[in-house]
Structures are given as C-alpha cells and as structure tokens.
Amino acid sequence: MLIRIRRMLLTFAMLSLSLQAASADQLCRSVDIKFRNDVPRSIKILKFEYYDVEDAKWRTENVGNFFQIQGATSGKMDESLEYVGNERISKFRVHYKWCGVQNANGQCSGWQKGSYTSVATPGIPDVTKCIKNLDVTIPVIHP
C-alpha cells in the first residue's frame, strides 16, 4: 500500500513538472519580429535563428518560401519562439538573400546569400525574458 502511494505521488510530481515546463513554453507566443533592412537593395529573409541561453543552442524558425523586404525599409511578422518561454535570448541570426544585380526596371536578376548575427539582441535587454507579445527588432546588415 505504501509503495502504491509513493508511486502515485511520484507520478503526480512528474506530471506537475511536465505541465509547468509546457506552460513556460507557451509564454513566448505571438512575438512581433520586425526585420529592419539596412541593405540598400531588397532582401528575402529565408530563416532566422535565436540563441537559447538556458539550453546553450541555436533554435531555428523557417519563414516558409521567403519574406521579402524592399531596400532600406522594415517588415514585420508574428512568430512563436519555441522552447524559450520565460527564458533569456542573447542573439539572433538572420539568413537572407540580397539583390546583387538589378536590371533597368529595378527588378532583381541576381540573388546572393548572406547572413547576419546580432551579438547583443536589439530590443531585448540582456536580462529580459522572452514573453508573450514581445516586440523585437532585428537589423539585417550586409557586410
């Protein structure tokens, strides 16, 4: 009987911990991410990554086909950042293509790949945690 009670308590404790972890990940939903294009020509965002400090690894968000931003403007998207609910994010890395060659009509005829890593996360002070409805601005700077 005592063994059954201990097993039940252990099961309840494990279930409680897993629910807490799941609810913590829910806290980083609906993050408004603004990509600021500091490149004078159009860019296509392919994917972006964010550094999960607690697990010490990069997490990837694919952007579907692509997210295009005209030269020297900004574009905004709504994303859910998984596994970092109520945790600190220290860096973002943006993978993009930029228009290397424009024709006479201003259309791009030659896309080239690039990436940019923001060392200190813009919009998120080092001590701020990722929470629901957070606004983040990520510059895309072509070297």
Image (spheres, rainbow, N blue to C red):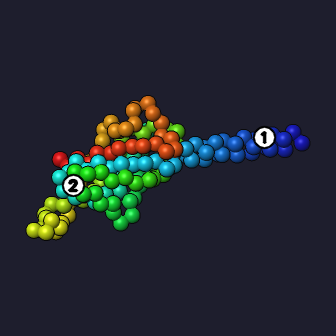
Image position of 78 with respect to 13: above or below: below
Q: Which mark is residue 58?
A: none
State the count of labels: 2
Give the mark nearest the N terminus, 1 or 2.
1
Q: Give the image location of residue 4, x and y in percent.
A: 84, 44
Q: Nearer the viewer, mark 1 or mark 2?
A: 2
3 or 28, which lies in front? 28
For mark 2, what is the residue? 71
User: Tag 2: Cα neighbours inside 10 Å, few (<14), some, or many (≥20)?
Assistant: some
Can I make out residue 98 in this image? Answer: no
Disc 2 element: loop
In the image, 49: left or right of 27?
left
Instruction: Write the residue at 17% across / 47% down.
Output: 143
In the image, 110: left or right of 37?
left
Instruction: Write the residue at 26% across / 51% down.
Output: 73
In the image, 32: left or right of 28?
left
Q: Give the image location of residue 34, x and y in percent.
A: 36, 48
88 or 5, which lies in front? 88
Q: Quadrant of residue 97?
A: bottom left
For mark 1, what is the residue? 9
User: Disc 2 marks which amino acid?
Assistant: Gly
Q: Quadrant of residue 52?
A: top left
Image position of 127 with respect to 100: above or below: above
User: Tag 1: Cα neighbours inside 10 Å, few (<14), some, or many (≥20)?
Assistant: few
Q: Give the image location of residue 12, x and y in percent.
A: 75, 43
Disc 1 element: helix
Q: Give the image location of residue 74, x and y in percent.
A: 30, 51
Can I make out residue 118 in this image? Answer: yes
Instruction: Write the residue at 39% across / 48% down.
Output: 33
User: Disc 1 marks which amino acid?
Assistant: Leu
Q: Looking at the figure, which quarter contains the N terminus? A: top right
